[in-house]
Amino acid sequence: MSAMTTDELRERDARLEDYDALRAERDRLRRVIAVERGDESQAPEGWRRDSIHWARHRWRVKAVRLGHDLKWIGYLDGVEVVRALSALEAMEAADAAREVADD
C-alpha cells in the first residue's frame, strides 16, 4: 500500500469535515424534532412545556399559524420579541435576547 499524496490527504480531510458537519446537522435536527414533540430533556435548560406553550421565567414560546406557515413566537411579558421556524430556535433566540438584556 502506497502512502497518500498531499492532495489525497487534503481530500480525505475535507470529506471527514463534511461527514462531521452532516452528523452535527443530523443531531441538531433530531433535537429540533424532539423539542417539537414536547421532549423537555432536549429543550434548553430551564424551559418547561405546558399544554400550549414552552415557558421559562417571563418568556413564553408557542406555535402560531401565519397564513400557511407555522412559526414559533417568543413572547416576553406578552410582547412578541422573537420568531423562528422551530420551538428550539425560538427558545435559543429568547435566551440570547435575555443574555443581552442582562448585560
Image (tube, grey):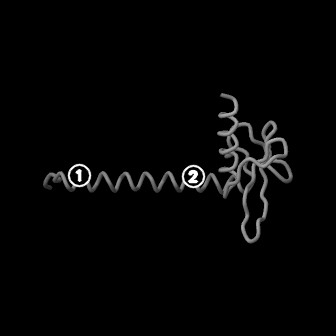
Residue at 17% across, 53% down: 4
The residue sitting at the top extreme is: 103
Q: Quadrant of residue 32?
A: bottom right
Label pair 1/2, CB-CB below 8 angstroms: no
**Mark 1, secondary structure of its residue:** helix
Find the distance from the CA under tag 1 to the CA under tag 2: 28 Å
67 over 56 or under it: above or below: below
Foreground pick, 82 / 85: 82
Identify the residue at the far bottom of this view. Answer: 68
Q: Which residue is drawn at the image coordinates 81% and 46% (left, top)?
A: 79
Left or right, 25 with reference to 81: left
Q: Quadrant of the N terminus?
A: bottom left
Crowdedness near tag 2: few (<14), some (14–19) or many (≥20) residues, C-alpha within 10 Å: few
**Where is residue 77 shown, x and y percent of the image?**
84, 41
Amino acid type indicated by mark 2: Arg
Q: Kindly identify the residue that appears in the image at 77 percent across and 58 percent down.
A: 63
Position of residue 51 in the picture relative to residue 24 (left or right)? right
Mark positioned earlier in the residue sequence (1 or 2): 1
The residue at the point 74 percent across, 71 percent down is 68
The amino acid pointed to by label 1 is: Leu
- Report crowding for label 1: few under 14, some 14 to 19, many 20 or more residues within 10 A (C-alpha): few
Pointer 1 residue: 9
